[in-house]
Image (cartoon, helix red, strand yellow):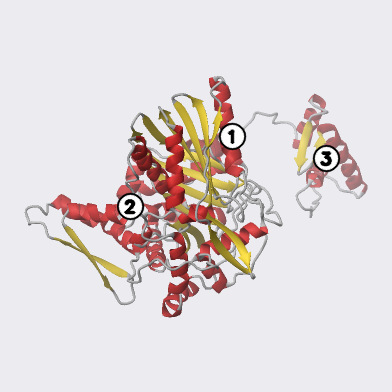
Amino acid sequence: MKTINELLSHLNSLDVKLWTEDIPGDTSEVRLRCNAPKDVLTPDLKSELAQRKAEILEFLLQLNLSSTAIKPVSRTDNISLSFAQQRLWFVDRLEPGNPFYNQPAALRLTGELQIDILEQSLQEIIRRHEILRTTFTTVARQTVQVIKSEVNFQLLVIDISNLSPIEKEAKVKQLAPQEARYPFDLERDLLLRVKLLKCDRQEHIILFTTHHIVSDGWSTGILIQEIATLYQAFLAGKPSPLPELPIQYVDFALWQRDYLQGETLETQKNYWLQQLENAPKILELPTDHPRPATQTFRGAKYSFNLSQELSAALNKLSQQQGSTLFMTLLAAFETMLWRYTGQEDIVVGTTIANRNRAEIEGLIGFFVNTLVLRTSLTGEPSFEELLKRVREVALGAYAHQDLPFELLVEQLRPERHLSYTPLFQVMFVLQNAPMSALELPGLTLSTLEGESDTSTSKFDLTLYMTETESGLEGCFEYNTDLFEPTTITRMVGHLQTMLEAIVANPQQRLSELPFLTKPKQQQLLVEWNNTQVNYSQDQCLHQLFEAQVEKTPDAIAVVFEDEALTYTQLNQKANQLAHYLKSLEVASGVLVGICIEPSLEQVVSLLGILKA
């Protein structure tokens, strides 16, 4: 997601003015006016504006600017939580010590690091952002935020420079996930933990962990950018160049509770109640293991990459169809879910930055909201038709994004079940591109992907996609109680094959989109079906079987579930049945019926009849 300033800067560079008009029965329509001279308004510029129209509309609806500004408020003794914070507090009380709402991040620092300057920078960030000095407690049955006026932050340094390169790598792989999984005490702990691993004089790794109740993905970017800005200033002996924040997170939390009342709340609520009326309770994905009675949130991740060519083709298709890349990827993901489940009413969750007001763009805090996207796949649509449906659903959701997910659940009152999450069990997220390397005096900062892993999964399945210069990167986060790694690997292959078919021919009906790679089709349809063998033409089937009994008497002949019979055992049972049938005067030409479920006895019966 681009920031407001980035979006406006791009449009200003084209000398384009934007405004919206409400269309009856529809969402707002974006109008574009270019003030550039006619000779500047080239066909290429017109084409770019047309291609970017859906992207601009998505941005505007996500920005969803309101005339109700957020202003600083006086601090009271009992400061309420935001709606999102309230939910995480409740989850923490139910599952104390569970790390699945930890937010880990890791940075590699290469060059001459001044540890005291880094510590000073972090101390200043904690001073700037009240939320990083906030804990939570209950007063008179009400959960409240407790803001400390100041904290004595000390950076913990772990020196591993005396280890060999192999030992260092192993130590980092041990410490990073260990730190990511270590739980927070929301009532007592500073909810930002920072540890510095000293690999050698020229290389350090810094591990950040925040609790989601005080942070989100956007906040991590703010944290890293402010570290870079402050470090550079303090290293030069200058004061902080960052302006004081106009508001704090607590101002947003109190504003949110005041804003979401009356007509505003009713409008938002009515949209979602209508949109999710009679929605399916659960998406019945075929799992490797039965769903446990109580969800454990144990999880793992599987990462993959799409080629630059495929990524570019997906972007081009999105522009041609008047949609965004998010919409195109979501439509493809929903197609895959439909193929797996056969359900034509698909409900998927997604997250939205919810930074839809300029005053909160630079704040660290828990702003992200969850949207529930429900799409109908009825009527054998083509992918193009499905993409139109997804676009309509997404734009409607963006236009009504202010209702916190917590209030939505409260209003819908879905039937709760300990084994799965309410409203949706599968999520799709298109993430911002990862932070590029930051150059500081004598120091380079770069993100470390995959080192910090909490080994948890909030949902049955989440697909994260990220745009990078080398193409789209993907990651499936999955519940290990339900899925085996091999299943997720196969799922990635199915998704990639479908995406390639979609960009090749988006007019194809969903049921016609290929699911299997060509090598897999060759294996399943040709190689595994190549069962032709030469055998004697003057012997019956049961006689050929008896010849095999002579060759391999102790080999396994037949298996059903957890039972098996060797060739000798199967032959003996078939002989016993054949003798019994002969006692009933069964002979050549007499019909014998079989009425039995698939089992070992079914095979015994067939052979026994042939022998009789």
Question: Callout 1 environment at 10 Å: few (<14), some (14 to 19), or many (20+)?
Answer: some
Rendering coords of residue 505 (x, y %): 35, 49
x then y, percent, for residue 85:
54, 61
Reading the chain from its start, which is encountered first: label 2 or label 3?
A: 2
Residue drawn at x 50%, y 59% is: 348
The label number, if any, that marks residue 426 in the structure image = none
Q: Which residue position is annotated with label 2?
A: 243
- The amino acid marked with disc number 2 is Pro
Q: Which amino acid does label 1 sit on?
A: Leu
The reply to whether callout 2 and callout 1 are in contact (CB within 8 Å) is: no
Give the alpha-carbon distance from disc 1 to disc 3, as whole Å. Answer: 67 Å
Mark 1 secondary-structure assignment: helix
For label 2, the SS is loop
- Is any part of residue 59 visible from this angle? yes
Image quadrant where residue 258 sits: bottom left
Circle 3 sits on which residue? 611
* Residue 51 sits above or below residue 554 on the image: below
389 left or right of 193 in image:
left
Q: Distance between the residues labelled 2 and 1?
A: 35 Å
Drawn side of residue 355 relative to residue 453, left or right: left
Q: Mark 1 points at which residue?
A: 175
Q: What residue type is labelled 3?
A: Lys
Q: Judge from the rendering whether residue 257 lies leftward or rightward of residue 313; answer left or right.
A: right
